Image (cartoon, grey):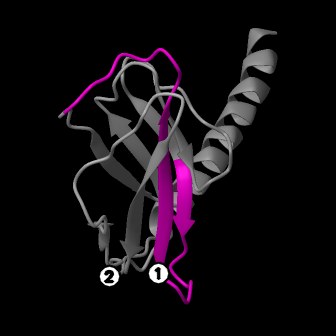
Amino acid sequence: MKNKIIKPMLLVIGILLIFCAVHTFALLRSSTSGSGTIDTATWSVTRNQSQSGDSIEIVPGLSTDSYTLTVQSNSEVDVIYSIIISDLPTGVEVDLDNSGNYRTPTSGTLRINSAGTINYNDSVKTKTHTLTFRAANGTTPVSDQEINIDVEFKQGL
């Protein structure tokens, strides 16, 4: 009676092994190979200082002063850039492009994320921004303090 049960089971196991082996070998029989080249895109970005003087003078509560910042990209990819202004005196706020939205720095640093985009297919590859500085009434006067303006570029996806 054991032989009657074992023989059909062995037959089923044998057929399954043959079926699996054929499909396993079929997967290993085909392969491909190839080679190619890929061109890389040109990355060329600059920040130009077009300010006539190197100083900004602000009278707290009475006057503002502005700075012109030019960003250029000759890249073959889209470029997104942020403007980082650091070493700002306490009480000084900054407006981008005369929007009327003055921004307050944190610990003397103001980061304007995604301030602009220059697409690789734009006909004009230069963007000009106006940074306007003001100080609130009661701000402590500061003279001869250097303010750093940096532009951070990243590739647009």
Closer-to-camera residue (65/33): 65
Q: Which residues are magenta?
A: 114-143
Can residue 81 be seen here? yes
Q: Are marks 1 and 2 in contact (CB under 8 Å)?
A: no
Numbered marks: total: 2
Q: Which residue is mark 2?
A: 35
**What type is the residue that disc 1 sits on?**
Lys
Residue at 70%, 42% (x, y): give it. Answer: 15
Please, which residue is most extreme toward the top here?
1
The residue carrying pointer 2 sits among few (fewer than 14), some (14 to 19) or many (20 or more) residues within 10 Å by Cα, namely: few
Give residue 45's position: percent from left, percent from top: 32, 69
Position above or below: 8 against 130: above
x%, y% of residue 75?
38, 77
Q: Residue furthest bottom?
A: 123
Q: Is residue 157 visible?
A: no
**Disc on res. 31:** none
Circle 1 sits on which residue? 125
